[in-house]
Image: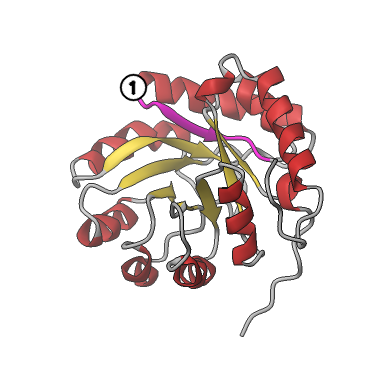
């Protein structure tokens, strides 16, 4: 059993429930990565994930990621594989580049170039806009092949695609996830980062290889405060 810090009672049971959902919904559960999303929580959330064998950790905010990485730098044991899930602001890339193992929200060539300048060969996922809603990140599905080709020309490891399902009932996200999987197949991309707490079953049934889960692992996030 995992030794869970007091801040996260019930973590073992929640993790078991998520793993059960993955085992039920995924055609090949062993091929699915569970990404622990720790945004809004302190370093103890990362330590809890690592203690449970969840080596891949996702963060949405650059300042939080950098701060947590600094706190955890002297910990014994393996370091987390940091996945950056937030919007890519070019002025923050220099601080993130030495830390981030995978950039999951690339949607413009300029973002990829900023990453490549600081981290040649960096692993990235292209974010696909399957919702078509203002304020949502991502590139239109029709433009994905061209962007992937251009990013590959920038000495980047384009490992796959990422998508955020449309809000509302989980079944409403199915068509978008199916389109992302189709694009990934056509472009020979192995990683399909699709599905979160509420819609992971739909995403897995449509070929997701990575689900991003925070609330179902750690509970409700505390309110975010700004300096």
| Front-lying residue, 22 or 89 | 22
**Residue sitting at 39 percent across and 70 percent down?**
92
Dot 1: element: loop
For the C terminus, the image quarter is bottom right
The picture places residue 165, in percent across and down from the top left corner, at 64, 38
Dot 1: within a 10 Å radius of its alpha carbon, few (fewer than 14), some, or many (20 or more) residues?
few
State the image coordinates of residue 80 (x, y, percent, origin top left). 47, 53
Name the quarter where the N terminus is drawn: top right
Applied colour scheme:
secondary structure
Q: Tell which residue pokes out farthest to the top in this image.
A: 27
42 shown above or below 150: below
Q: Is residue 195 magenta?
A: yes
Q: Is residue 193 above or below residue 208?
A: below
Q: Nearer the viewer, residue 217 or 150?
A: 217
Query: Which stretch appears magenta?
Result: 189-196
Is residue 43 within the magenta segment?
Answer: no
Residue 172 in view of the camera? yes
Residue 38 can be seen, yes or no: no
For mark 1, what is the residue? 188
As drawn, 118 above or below 165: below
Q: Position of residue 132 (x, y in %)?
A: 59, 42
Which of the 4 image quadrants contains residue 45? bottom right
Q: How far across and down, in percent of the image, does residue 176 sit?
A: 59, 29
Q: Is residue 86 left or right of residue 19?
A: left
Residue at 35% from the left image edge and 66% from the top image edge? 93
């Amino acid at each position: 059993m995992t030794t869970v810090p007091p801040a996260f009672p019930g973590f073992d049971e929640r993790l078991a429930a998520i793993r059960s959902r993955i085992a039920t919904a995924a055609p090949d559960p062993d091929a699915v990565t569970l990404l622990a999303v720790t945004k809004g929580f302190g370093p103890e959330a990362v330590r809890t994930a690592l203690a449970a064998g969840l080596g891949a950790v996702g963060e949405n905010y650059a300042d939080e990621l950098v701060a947590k990485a600094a706190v955890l730098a002297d910990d014994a044991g393996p370091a987390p594989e940091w996945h950056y899930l937030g919007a890519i602001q070019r002025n923050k890339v220099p601080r993130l580049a030495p830390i981030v193992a995978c950039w999951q929200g690339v949607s413009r060539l300029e973002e990829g170039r900023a990453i490549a300048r600081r981290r040649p060969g960096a692993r990235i996922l292209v974010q696909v806009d399957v919702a078509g809603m203002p304020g949502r990140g991502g590139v239109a599905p029709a433009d994905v092949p061209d962007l992937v080709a251009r990013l590959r020309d920038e000495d980047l490891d384009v490992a796959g695609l990422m998508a955020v399902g449309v809000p509302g009932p989980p079944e409403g996200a199915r068509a978008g996830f199916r389109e992302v999987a189709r694009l990934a197949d056509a472009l020979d991309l192995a990683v399909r980062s699709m599905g979160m707490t509420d819609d992971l079953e739909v995403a897995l049934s449509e070929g997701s290889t990575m689900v991003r889960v925070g609330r179902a692992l750690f509970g409700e996030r505390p309110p975010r405060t700004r300096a």
